[in-house]
Amino acid sequence: MSNVSLQIDGKAVSAKEGMTLLEAARGAGISIPTVCYHEKLEPFGGCRLCVVEVEAGGRKSLVAACTHPVQQDQTVNTRSKQIDGIRKVLTEQLLAYAPESEVLQALAREYKADKDRFPREPSFCILCGLCVRYCAEVKQKYAVGFVDRGPSREISFVPELAATECWDCKQCFPLCPTSALQAAFVLTRSLRASPSPARPALNKQVETAPVPE
Amino acid sequence: MDTARIESIIDSHDGEASSLIQILLDIQNELHWLPAEALQLVSERLQVPMSRIQHTATFYKAFSLVPKGRHEINICMGTACHVRGAPRVLEVVQNITGIQPGETDPDMKFSLDTVNCLGCCALGPVMEIDEQHLGKLVPDTAAEVLKKYE
């Protein structure tokens, strides 16, 4: 693999072809904030907090550093008024869902985000997908996944798998930036113990429903 | 549940993991819902993790994880149908069937749902029963039509 040289924050950086901007920057000791990134996992590009400004061929554009590959002679800016503004709003939006998250509170201090800017909708999950992707990519157990879509999207354990796999693993717990996962896990367990109509999908509730003729 | 029927649906798609959505659609058409046992079987045969099937089955509105009635009624609530009186049609249908959108009656006769556009705005208000489109409805004709279904 050939080497690529680029400039990040005015510092000459050399990176391997195929690396992402985030990897190149971190390799050179330049920090870029992330929430949904994990070095063992495929890039997800979900939280967008790693947004940076890329200048190539005289054009500037904003890209997610965790998914954007390095290119020869790129000029990258990791801090600017515009970028800080974007990260501030993103943090404020995430804080509406998980006001108690320490990861987000640290970002709020850094980017002067106002945690009360948006009305709170504490679902305690910011859908970063770390637990889902860790279970699928590293453990290859697929015990937790996303369900539903849009505003009602959430994470859900597959009860049958969770019952056999999760108790002795729990490796996804410390990954969670909001500690939502533990709550979801406990929820699944209680759903198993007493079938409730709250989520009729895939639990015992459906079996008691009348069968179509 | 008829395992053989599910098996034959999977076989008709050569057990390809990439045909997951088509297989789920076929099961949905056949049974009017996706029972957990059927999904388990699909997961095993296609070697697709259950969490991904859950993801897909909850993502698309075409799939149902609870049993649906013999006749599925969709009432269009799109802008054109709305201004042409869809709320009145919906009200009559609700009164006759005794169910709200998203529900199925206890006899498993009707399932009622509202949709946002069926793509034939010139025919509004539109109601769809078992994939048959009925256009330019007034509440009385909607009530008449429902009587034909058993």
Image (cartoon, coloured by chain):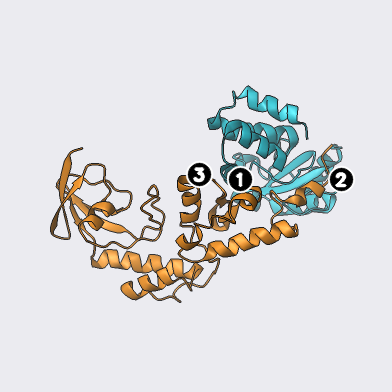
Tell which chain the image draws in orange: A
Find numbered disc 3 in the image and state the secondary structure of the residue it sits on.
loop
Q: Earlier in the sequence, mark 2 or mark 1?
A: 1
- Do callouts 1 and 3 point to residues on the same chain? no
x, y (%) of residue B78? Answer: 61, 49
Find numbered disc 2 in the image and state the secondary structure of the residue it sits on.
loop
Report which residue position mark 2 lands on.
B107
Compared to residue A147, the image places residue B17 above or below, namely above
Colour in which the image shows chain B: cyan
- Between circles 3 and 2, the one closer to the viewer is 3
For the N terminus of chain A, give its image quadrant: top left
Read off the chain for label 3: A
- Between circles 1 and 3, the one closer to the viewer is 3
- Residue A158 visible from this viewpoint: no
User: Contact (CB < 8 A) between labels 2 and 1?
Assistant: no
Find numbered disc 1 in the image and state the secondary structure of the residue it sits on.
helix
The CA distance from mark 3 to mark 2 is 43 Å
Compared to residue A113, the image places residue A151 above or below, namely above
x, y (%) of residue B39? Answer: 66, 39
Report which residue position mark 1 lands on.
B54
Identify residue type, mark 2: Asp
Identify residue type, mark 1: Gln
- Do callouts 3 and 2 point to residues on the same chain? no
The CA distance from mark 2 to mark 1 is 28 Å
In this rendering, position of residue A161 left or right of residue A54: right
Q: Nearer the viewer, residue A186 or A44?
A: A186
Q: Quadrant of residue A4?
A: top left
x, y (%) of residue B25? Answer: 64, 34
- Between circles 2 and 1, the one closer to the viewer is 1
x, y (%) of residue A27? Answer: 23, 55
Report which residue position mark 3 lands on.
A140
